[in-house]
Amino acid sequence: MIHVGKSEKGIYGLHNNISAKAVQPTEHFVRPEAMFRWMLYENERIQIVDKENDVERREFLRCATLAGTTVLFDRSALAFTKAAPSVSKSAKTELTDVLAHVPGGNTVGGEVREKTMRSDGYFHIDTPRMIARLKELHVNTCNYLIWNSPSDWDDLRNEFLPAAEKAAIQVWTYMAPPAETYAKGKGSDPYRTNYEKWAEELAHLSLRYRSLKAWVMDDFTWNMKTFTPEYVARLQEITHAINPELRFFPVIHFTAMSAEWIRSYKPYIDGVVCPYIDLPYNNTQRTTSLNPSINHARETLGLPVYVLLYAGRHLTSPLEPTPEYITNAIQIGVRAISEGRCGGIISYGTELDPQPLSTQGNGALEGNGRLYLAAVGVNGRAGDFAQASQTIHIAPNSPRYQLSFWHEDNWLRPLAPKGQYIKQLLIDETVVWQCDVAADDNYWLQGSILQGPINLTSILKGRSTARLTIRLIAQSDGPKSPIQVSFDALEATGFTLRNPGFESSEAWHLEDKGQALLAAIDHFMPDLRRQVFVAVSREFARAQRMFASSKF
C-alpha cells in the first residue's frame, strides 16, 4: 500500500510492506524541488508526483494500480482528480471446480428453444428442457449467452435464473463484444455495447439471484480497443459499487496474455476464460499443448484460469472435435483442477439436443473413413510433414505388384503457388510417387490425373516386407496456404494392405513433424454430436464425484 499525503517537505509516499516481494523505497519523502521520485514495488516503477497537474496525478494512480498497489490519500493532501479505480478482490472467493456449458456463437443446438413462437415474434429459451439437459450433462455452471435473440435478457431474468437457482446451477452471463454486434443483426440486447449499463444491470440482478456469479466478455482478445484497462476498471467500479462479489472474466487466448497485457489488466479482472485450440496451429484434434498452456497461464497471471474446450465446431479448425479428443481434453483439465492449477472447464458448443449429421459432412470417397493430412497455414519449415504408414507383407510369387489409390485436395483459400506442399508415396525411404498439391483440382483423382494405379514391381519383387508411407510434406520455409489432403480407397495387388479404406483407426501409424501439419484418420459419424454429449456428460459426472469425495 502507498499512503500519499502532504507534509512540510511536500507530497510523500509512505510504503507499507504488505508483500514479501515488496522492495522498500529509497526515500519516503519527495523533495518539492525534485518534482518526482521513482519507487520500486514488486518490480514495478511508481511515480510520486508533486505537481498541480491532473495528467501526472492520473498517471501516478495508473502506475500504482498496475502494480497491484492500493493508493490512499490524506484529507490534507492536494485535491486529486478521480482516476481509474483500484479494484479490490478481497471480498471474492475463487470459483473452483467449475464444470460449465456455453452454447457458442456459431454452433447448432447449444441452447434449447421453444418450438412455438411467442406473441412477441421470438422463439424463447425452453427453460425446463434446457435445465433438464444441463443436469444430464452434469454441469454445475451455465454460461448463458445473451446474443442469439432479443428475448434472451428477459428469459434470463424472468425464467432461467430462478430455475437455475432451484437446480443448483450457477450462471455466468456470456456477452457479445462490439465486433460481434450488428446494427441489423445479433447483439447483446437490449443494451448492446453500452457495457456500463450492462455492468449496472447485471450487478443488480446478481443481488436478486445469488446463483449469478460472473459475466464473461467474449473475444476480448480482438476487442481491446474498446476494453482498455481504464474502461474495464470503470466497469468493475460500477459492479462493485452494487455487488462486490460479481466477477468479470474476459475471454482471451493463452497466447495473447503477454507480460504487458497481464500488467495492464490484472488489477481489473477476476480471472480469465482461455479457449484452447492448440494455437497457433488451430486444431481440435491435439491436446499436447493444453497442460503447458494451463501451467504457464496460472503461473504468470496468478488469477483463476477457466479453460474453454471445443466440443462443437471451431470455425477455422480443420476437423470437428471427436469424442476421443474431448474426453482426453477434459481429463487433462480435471487433473489441473484437482491440483489447483485451473479453476474449471467450459464445454463449448456441446449440442444439448443432438441431431444426426447430414451425409454432406462425409469427406470420404467410399464408406465413412479417409486419411486426412492438413496444413494450417502458419509459419513452418521445409521438411515438416504429416504422414501415415504401415508395414506391408509381400506375396513372393505374384506376377505383378501395384497400388491403386485416390486422393483429393481441398484448399481453404485461393489456390496457392506451386512449391509449398508435395503429396508423396514412399516404399521405405524411396519416393515412388509424388505430386505438387497446387497441380491438382479439388476433386478425387486416381494417381496423377489419369495415371491410375502405380506399378511397384521393380521395388517390391523378391522382398517379404516393406514400409508403405503416405505423406504431405512442406517444400519451403515461412507462411503457407492452408490445405487439406485426403486419401481413400487404396487397393493392393501382390501384397497385403490392412485397413485400406481407413474405416477404422487400425494398422496405420500416424505421425507429424512440425506442429503446423496434422495427420488424422477422419471417420464420418452420423451420431457424432450425440457421442460428444455422452463423452462430456460421462467425464463431467466423474469429475463431480471426484470433487465431492475430495471434500471429505
Image (cartoon, helix red, strand yellow):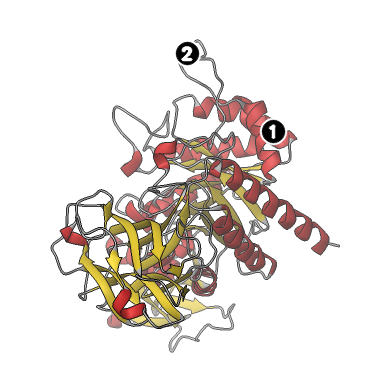
Q: Is residue 19 left or right of residue 11?
A: right
Q: Is residue 173 left or right of residue 400?
A: right
Secondary structure state at the residue bearing disc 2: loop
Secondary structure state at the residue bearing disc 1: helix
Kindly give the residue lying farthest to the bottom in the view shown. Answer: 26
Residue at 43% across, 89% down: 26
- Residue 255's disc is none
User: Which quadrant of the view contains residue 197?
Assistant: top left
What residue is pinned by disc 1? 132
Q: Quadrant of the C terminus?
A: bottom right
What residue is pinned by disc 2? 120
Characterize the local packing of mark 2: few (<14), some (14-19) or many (20 or more) Cα atoms within 10 angstroms.
few
Characterize the local packing of mark 1: few (<14), some (14-19) or many (20 or more) Cα atoms within 10 angstroms.
few
Kindly give the residue lying farthest to the top in the view shown. Answer: 119
Residue 112, x across and y down, in percent: 57, 30
Q: Is residue 451 left or right of residue 403?
A: left
